[in-house]
Image (cartoon, grey):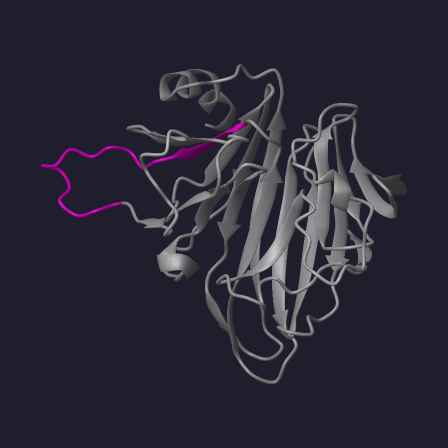
Amino acid sequence: MSVTVVPYSGWERNLRLANDQVELIVTLEVGPRIVRYGFIGEKNVFGEFAGQLGQKGESKWQIRGGHRFWIAPEQKPLTYELDNGPVEFEEIEGGVRLIQPQGPLSGIQKTMDIRLLDANGRVSVRHSLTNRTDKAIACSPWALSVMAKKGLAIIPLPDVVPHDERLTPNQNWTLWSYTDLADQRYQIGSSLILIRQDPARGPTKIGLAQREGWIGYLADGYLFVKHFQRLENASYPDCNVNCEIYTDEDILELETLGPLTSLEPGQSVQHEEQWALFKDVPDCTCEEEVNADVLPYVM
């Protein structure tokens, strides 16, 4: 693996982490943000807002695209604390650590450890929140990836258990006031939820207490997979969910959350995702096709 400083989309100072297969671009001028993940010379699997790339120092929060790091539960203005300024970095074993200054509103410092795990391009992203104030703060690390348009989010469901074998529930979903399960972007099957990004449709969102350990996104033959864990003895935001999918006319976000913690002064809480990327995966339109063409990559 190599780490070099390169220009990217109008920003002069960006870290490029690369091996023979894939590359990550991490800007140092705003963030922490991972703005690109893709095979070398091929498409960025993350969505980008072209008019916001290369910019910095804005007085309002900018979505920009790529992978970002928020504080949950969502609230204004704290969650939308500006990340429009520079971040520091240091090299760590296998990768880099991004270090954001203490947030002026939250009093929390964000760090992001990014590692290329192997020659096949698997990535570890470890998100840490540290309380730099003198009082406890209730918070949860929240990892959000803005994906390219017109793709398909894939969320596995628990195995079906016959009624006479289990009488208690094994799923927990959270719906927002603007969630409509009759929306044709949703396909709810027996083993999967599929959600299509549609440039003609506005906001919708769903959350799940996700114990299957992965979610994916398929677009233009590229399959992006996040692996993550749920701690069964922990509590999570938004009615105890650790996985959320948001989409509107511009984006689809794959979101995972760490445990909701009363963070004492000086304490930290972490949440790790592991990413994988595959190409030449057939487009899928239904649960049966996903089971046949996608699941072999993640199981």
Tell which of 120 and 220 is nearer to you.
220
Q: Residue at x 13, y 38 (%)?
A: 165
What x and y, as percent, mark residue 270? 57, 59
Q: Is residue 240 left or right of residue 132?
A: left
The magenta stretch spans residue 160: yes
Residue 105 falls in which quadrant of the image?
bottom right
- Residue 94 appears in the figure: no
Q: Does the magenta stretch mainly form a helix, a strand or a loop? A: loop
Tell which of 253 and 274 is nearer to you.
253
- Residue 165 appears in the figure: yes
What x and y, as percent, mark residue 240? 37, 57
Q: Is residue 174 left or right of residue 254?
A: left
Question: Which residue range is magenta in the image?
Answer: 151-170
Seen in the picture, residue 157 relative to 69 is either above or below; the reply is: above
Q: Quadrant of the C terminus?
A: top left
Q: Is residue 136 left or right of residue 10?
A: left
Q: How many numbered discs sit on the rendered protein? A: 0
> Which residue lies most toward the left here?
164
Q: Is residue 31 left or right of residue 252?
A: right
Q: Residue at x 45, y 47 (%)?
A: 243
Seen in the picture, residue 171 relative to 197 is either above or below; the reply is: below
Residue 123 falls in which quadrant of the image?
top right
What x and y, as percent, mark residue 241? 39, 53
The magenta stretch spans residue 140: no
What x and y, as percent, mark residue 64? 70, 46
Q: Residue at x 46, y 60 (%)?
A: 259
Q: Quadrant of the N terminus?
A: top right
